Amino acid sequence: MHSLIKPSQPALRTILNKNYSALSTIPNVMRVRHISSTSACKKDIESWKKEISQKTKVETDVITPSQVNLLGNTLDHPKFNYDQFPAHGTEIPPGWHLAYFPPRVPEKELAKDGYDKEWSPPEPYVRRKWAGGKLEWNVDNPLRVGDEIKMESKLSKVDIKKGNSVFVWVDGKIHNKQGLALTESRCWVYTTDDASKEEEVSKITQNKSSSHEVMSNPEFSFNVTPTPITLFRFSALTFNSHLIHYDHTFATQVEKQKGCLTHGPLSLIYMVNQLDQYLATKDADQQAGHNQTKDRRIKSFEYRCLKPLAVNEALTISGRWKTNDKEGPSYDLWIMNDAGDVAVKGLAIIDKVN
């Protein structure tokens, strides 16, 4: 979902001939080399947009302790690893709702490389990656173990870029019995086989120079290296069957990546969890010193995925206080890859619970 690179036809034919009969129909899509006309393509997108804009997807789930524990073991979270099952009513860490509301569709309705096509535009936009998003938490109504939850999702925006990409924004609202708990906007970018890596990166990065601003003087940092097992476990937990996350041959020979790619949602969880733990430690220290301070929570987080993150790549997740503004104190968060580049960048707004 991070990066989609045009494969050469010889490489594609080679890999598809090697026991990839399930993907035998991909070449017909990938051989699209020219769109008859830009206006015709836009017409197809507008027609799809008009149709899908009428749709509201409603999903239900239950925040089970087992799923929290399994994600805790995937991340090696100190409160939820090994056999530590959270008690009923335990508040789940920010971002862990992503282990719920999996795509509930049979394999025949997935894309040929395994991703869920629920919000996908029509062909030839067949390649997908996670581009970013925004989350807004109701700090007075956090999600807790045992909650029966409902998510209503709706298309919010479609942005057709000049060239071969379409950005699709979907807004989801998650409620428990107490009301609204979380609003999340997700952005995917869909491209054709003609879209080059350079074109995709330049569109998502937009203001690349600003990413260097947050590369120094972090208040906290955490190092992690996602392994093939990490990515497999996260794919299993989220029921994400996109081959690029767990099939090395597909990721390297078809997608032309260095290896399988770390999930965008996993990067998001890494970032907000590190800030959440940092704030909890800082608040505990202040309270131990008899400072009258309230526990702080992340109120919102907006982020962009700038570069793909490959499996076995050493990552550094960092953050630092930025400023106080009318919305509240804010923190810059970022992930640096093993080359020292900022791969994911975001801004978190902090609030205090009553």
Image (cartoon, rainbow, N blue to C red):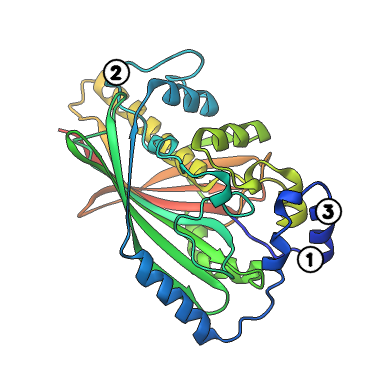
Q: Is 338 or 30 nearer to us in this picture?
A: 30
Horizontal arrangement in the rendering, residue 207 relative to residue 108 (left or right):
left
User: Could you say where residue 242 lies in the image, as x and y percent from the top left?
Assistant: 60, 47
Residue at 52%, 80% (x, y): give it: 41
Residue at 44%, 35% (x, y): give it: 99
At label 2, counting other C-alpha atoms closer than 10 Å, the crowd grade (few under 14, some 14-19, many 20 or more) is: few
On the image, numbered disc 1 is attached to which residue? 8
Q: On the image, which quarter does residue 139 sit in?
A: top left
Horizontal arrangement in the rendering, residue 135 relative to residue 115 (left or right):
left
On the image, numbered disc 2 is attached to which residue? 88
**Residue 134 can be seen in this image:** yes
On the image, numbered disc 3 is attached to which residue? 17
Q: Are marks 2 and 1 in contact (CB under 8 Å)?
A: no
Q: Amino acid at mark 3?
A: Asn
Q: Amino acid at mark 2?
A: His
The nearer-to-camera label among 3 and 1 is 3
Q: Amino acid at mark 1?
A: Ser
User: Could you say where residue 160 lies in the image, as x and y percent from the top left?
Assistant: 46, 74
